[in-house]
Image (cartoon, rainbow, N blue to C red):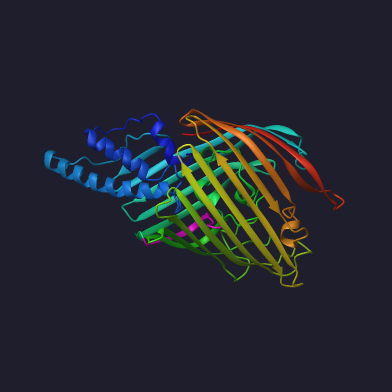
Amino acid sequence: MRKGVTRSGRGPARRGRWSREGAAVAAGLLGFLSSGGLAQEGPTTRPIERRLEDLERENRELRARIEAIERIGASEPEEGLEVEETVGPGITFRYGDVRSTFQIFADAGFAYANPEASGQGHSAFALGTVDLFASMQMGERAHILSETLVKKRGDDTGIEQERLWASWTFGDRLYAKLGVDHSPISHWNRIYHHGEWLFTTADRPSLGQFEEGSGFLPSHFAGLELGGSVSTSLGRLEYVGTVSNGRGPEVDERQVFSDANDDKAFELGLGLAPAGAEPLQVGVAAHVDKIPENPSNPAQPDPIREQILTAYADYRAPGLEILAEGGWIRHEDTGTDDTFHHRSGYVQLGLPRGNTTPYTRFDIRSMREDDPYFAEADRDLDRRLQVFGVRYDLHANLAAKLELGLGRTERRHSSGDVTRDSLTTAEFQLAWVF
């Protein structure tokens, strides 16, 4: 498995100020795993997180017993900041009932593409992103998360606050979250977020690309999220709903500080882990919004109604990983009543064998040309790509990925003509976390 929590068992131990009996060390290890640091917290639909929730409940009980024993056996209770002894990357501090986890993700590599991207050569070395991830758990109910990226912005390097939210958990059936997070409409982004060390492949599929790149989904939202989970006769059901500012006038614009119109975006997601079929999970998500007009784009003088539907299937077991996701987008121009339909999807297969994971992924997007919202940024062009690659874990915290891709892509030339060309890609990436 490639989700962060599955790697923590192989990392080196960190020594802090505290020293306890073996049971306390075990509690600390379980506490690190249950804190979700490597999973980059946020409600998801993975079976591993349900198992971690069970571990977390057991861990709280164990800690309570240990603390009771210590109160009886010690003349003065230990107070102050503690650096917990943990296994895996990152560092965890504890002060009373407040636990803080800090991690840094980064990557660098070499990439080749033919045809080349506009204004670039065929090949280049490139620094990826530096992801500063912090999570704070206050008691059993309050949780705060921050994710800040240092990344390429045009020809310069910039700092972007990708996620920042606070949540309160009322119980398994209900939590409330306020702030900026990744939208439930993309299953890929809800399970992997930004740290490229977390996922098997060297790059994201089309449905997982972000707005400032080549993405066409609203990957981020700023607003309120409510969700929870419940056990049913069919299996474990997870649900999430959001109300947010929605899309900006341009496809790469995130409305995190204001809203260009009074219309809000709404999303609803459902996930099910069928009883007796773990570790399989399936789910669907829907998004509705009214995109504001764009005065700087003559082709978009009126608002656009947007409906999105996505579905996924996720299977993770020792020796086999299968991840599939599909998305359907409908845009209606309120000025002309023209309707544009877009489709995209991928199927990814991985075969973990110790430190080595061979993988392949077929990724396709079929877009309707001249959609006024997508066309200005060339997001209305078709592309399909079959990648073959291998990931090798050089260390618990360091992974090397080698990938080759073959496919077809559409290109829009300065004349406005669109042509279809063969596409060849190759990439070598080092991704790490500490």
Q: Compared to 66, does 358 lie above or below?
A: above
Q: Compared to 186, does 39 lie above or below?
A: above
Is residue 181 in the magenta section?
yes
Residue found at the very far front of the displayed protein: 276
Residue found at the very far top of the displayed protein: 394
Q: Picture quarter containing residue 170? A: bottom left
Where residue 180 appears, as percent x and y from the top left, is 51, 56
Residue beneath the point at 75% across and 62% down: 372
Q: In this view, does 362 lie to the left or right of 238?
A: right
Is residue 368 in the magenta section?
no
The answer to whether residue 124 of the structure is visible from this angle is yes
The answer to whether residue 209 of the structure is visible from this angle is no
Where residue 278 appears, as percent x and y from the top left, is 42, 49
**Front position in the image: 18 or 186:** 186
Residue beneath the point at 77% across and 58% down: 369
Q: How many marks?
A: 0
**Front position in the image: 349 or 110:** 349
**Front position in the image: 133 or 37:** 37
Q: Compared to 336, does 411 lie above or below?
A: above
Dominant SS of magenta comes to strand
Q: Picture quarter containing residue 267? A: bottom right
Start-end of magenta stretch: 173-185
Q: Is residue 165 left or right of residue 71?
A: right
Where residue 411 appears, as percent x and y from the top left, is 79, 47
Where residue 134 appears, as percent x and y from the top left, is 44, 45
